Image: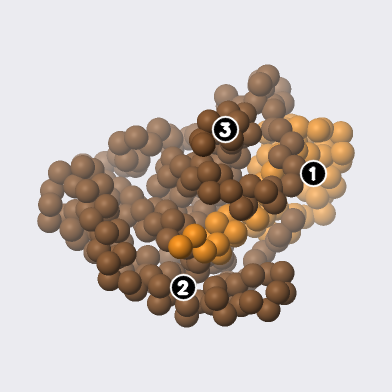
Chain colours: A orange, B brown
Amino acid sequence: MLSCKEVSRLTSLAQERPLGLWERVQFKVHLLICKNCSNFAKNIGLLRDISREHARRDDN
Amino acid sequence: MDLNREKGRENGPEDGSGNGSKNSPAHNASRLSDPQYLKELQVKMLKFAQIQLSDHQLAEDAVQEALIGAMKNAKSFGGKSAFKTWVFAILKNKISDILRKRHRTAEVTNLVGNSASEDEDFSNLFDETGHWANGMEPKKWGDPEAELKDKQFWLVFETCLDNLPEKQAKVFMMREHIGLSSDEICENEGLTVSNLHVLLYRARMRLQKCLELRWLEEGKEDYA
């Protein structure tokens, strides 16, 4: 069983490369049962969207 | 999840509105070659660099190099404040390099004001069993659509970026704002892929926490 701390690492890693099969299974199972990590994973995804928009937006 | 982004990416809206030309790379770059704007930016950079370095000549050199370096990716930025955040990220890294050479020790890895240590591991966010610690649990952010149009939100986000240790800030922006691949960043910065992943993880942890504290929890009214 992965800890939330380990899952937080995998969440970030998943933004960089595809997770291996076993990583992915453990990761997804953990997200199913852990609301906190599920929120975290969504937030990290949103962080990417926010950053992209930050670069893109015209504030002039 | 967005996996393995390709190197470089097109600017412009991604909603297929067909309004690509207003925010095209050529348009962005030309706006940023406004001499008055660059002059003002340079002044701000110089003030910052002088405080950090206490040496006018070194400060000038650092500012010049940082501006030239930043201009290479200017077309990735649609607006001035995001570009400024990027320029300062580069400047802080240059200053950090100069300070490190000056003191000739690996201990000086962060600028005055940045508190991250080399083995930052966020142990305050997790308890001894590896669960999220009490009060540190990630919240639901919901759909940020309204936020993305809110000037105050962007001020908060920029504050969070500015508060990152300089190396984390730079690689995070290279990855997320400019869209460089892991390999390109590693080559540019002399990092292993593993180093890079650690830096990005730390940046993301900090940014997530910072946004939660400053935006979600403090309430938007505080920044009105």
The location of residue B134, given as percent across then percent down, is 68, 19
Please tell me in which quadrant of the rendered image residue B69 appears: bottom left
The location of residue B108, given as percent across then percent down, is 30, 39
**Marks 1, 3 in one chain:** no
Q: Residue at x 40, y 47 (%)?
A: B166
Q: Residue at x 65, y 66 (%)?
A: B5
Report helix, strand or loop for mark 2.
Answer: helix
* Tags 2 and 3 touching, CB below 8 Å: no
Label 2 or label 3, whichever comes before in sequence order:
2
Residue type beneath disc 3: Glu
Q: Which residue is mark 3?
A: B221
Report helix, strand or loop for mark 1.
Answer: helix
* Tags 1 and 2 touching, CB below 8 Å: no
Q: Which residue is mark 2?
A: B28
Residue type beneath disc 2: Asn
- Vertical order, B62 against B111 (above or below): below
Please tell me in which quadrant of the rendered image residue A52 appears: bottom right
Report helix, strand or loop for mark 3.
Answer: helix
The location of residue B1, given as percent across then percent down, is 74, 56
- Vertical order, B39 against B89 (above or below): below
How dense is the environment of label 2, judged by Cα within 10 Å: few (below 14), some, or many (20 and up)? many
Mark sitting on residue A27: 1
- Vertical order, A57 against B16 (above or below): above
